[in-house]
Image (cartoon, helix red, strand yellow):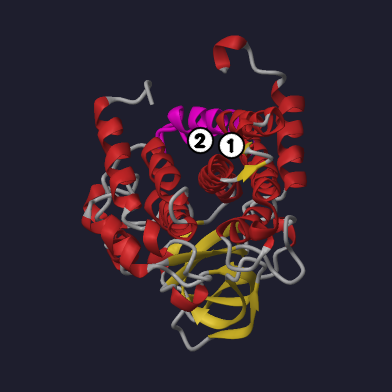
Amino acid sequence: MESLTPKQQAFAEEAERVAETFAEEAYTWHGDLPWENTAALADADLLCPSIDERYGGQGLSDLAAVLLVDAVGRVCPDTGWFAYTQSTVGPRAIDLFGGDTVKERYLPAVTAGEGHVAIAISEPDAGSDVGSMATAVEEEGGGLVCSGEKTWVGGVPFSDAAVTWVKFPEGLGSVVLPLDDPGVEVVEEHTNMAGYSQTHFRIDEVPIPESHVLTRGKEAFKEQLVSLNWERLGSAICATSWATAGLEHALAYAQEREQFGERIADFQGMEWKLAEMYRQIETAAATVYGAAAAAQGHETPPDRTRTSVAKLHCSETAERVVSEAVQTVGARAYQQGHPLEYLYRLTRGRRIAAGTDEVMKNTIARALKEEGVPAVSER
């Protein structure tokens, strides 16, 4: 990538090198977490690159996290998912909004590839409408206690804690909820189309140390919305990496498969299909890399509108491209156990998780109404 600095280029190349070691076992995890792969990333000092160096990260920009997820996800989608969730979602929120105590408690294990932090936002009666959340933190006996329910939470079986969105008496906020507390009860484990576990759990008067409060107060909701921009950024590049994997499988097959005396890759109709898939991937990558390049942690967080555009466009692109890859390979790709069949199920979820298509469009439209169409100098 020509626009990268020498340090960023070296980081990307190292991420690609390590990712290639995951290829043999890729598509075999079936929703399990590939801990050996995360350990390899940690050993290479690649995991969670934008997290503070004091806690095992590299203190790099958000662009480094995007480079990591892109490199890993196109080789091993499951390891890419882990890199995305831990580099740009729960642990990133702790790194950005937490104090030293809670950072010391959770981040070193994550950056070492030995821990996992989930994020819990949705509730049985509150999805996109976070203002309707009922999970609350109240003051009781001189301390804080949390009660409520959360659902569709990924990674709970192997997570140490969850960054949990809650209501304080004065408004929305977030806390780090220890998942091993006796007051956290699993109500149901769902298994989604991709084979990943999503948990519905109940929270019954779980004590929350003051050190575990991330955001609270009148400005908390704004901070929460800003934190979503990192998640959307990660989700967008994760989807793009899976689309790239889909194209690579389709291209390899088309160059080997012969029909009517020639490779199907040489049919003009197939050439156009492959070219269109690549065009869509490149356009998607440009949106997410552009948003990431402009972000610099707390000082300049990812832009709300640009990350919403990236999340929306990349999610839709991934589903379209992988669908075309399945069409290219045909019946083989439609069988359970084929990499493209798995990718197809994975990519569909990207249009729901981290903000649905409809919510992204609402966010973009609101920004246009409030701020107008950006000038050329603002692009």
Which dot marks residue 133? none
Nearest the eye: 70 or 370:
70
- Considering only order in the chain, which callout, 1 or 2, is on the residue closer to the N terminus? 2
Type of amino acid at the residue the image marks with label 1: Thr
Left or right of 259 in this view: 235: left
Secondary structure found at label 2: loop
User: Which residue in the protein does label 1 denote?
Assistant: 307
Q: Is residue 116 visible?
A: yes
Task: Give the percent coordinates (x, y) of residue 203.
Answer: 58, 80
Q: Residues within 10 Å of mark 1 (few under 14, many from 20)?
A: many
Which dot marks residue 302? 2
Q: Is residue 110 visible?
A: no
Task: Quadrant for residue 339, please give it.
Answer: bottom right
Nearest the eye: 2 or 373:
2
Q: Are marks 2 and 1 in contact (CB under 8 Å)?
A: yes
Task: Quadrant for residue 280, please give it.
Answer: top right
Task: Give the percent coordinates (x, y) of residue 257.
Answer: 59, 46
Residue 300 among those drawn in magenta:
yes
Task: Quadrant for residue 368, please give it.
Answer: top right
Magenta residues span 283-308
Majority secondary structure of the magenta segment? helix
Q: Residue at x 34, y 25 (%)?
A: 4
Nearest the eye: 1 or 334:
334
Q: Residue at x 53, y 71 (%)?
A: 30
Give the Cα distance between marks 2 and 1: 7 Å
Task: Give the percent coordinates (x, y) of residue 179.
Answer: 47, 78
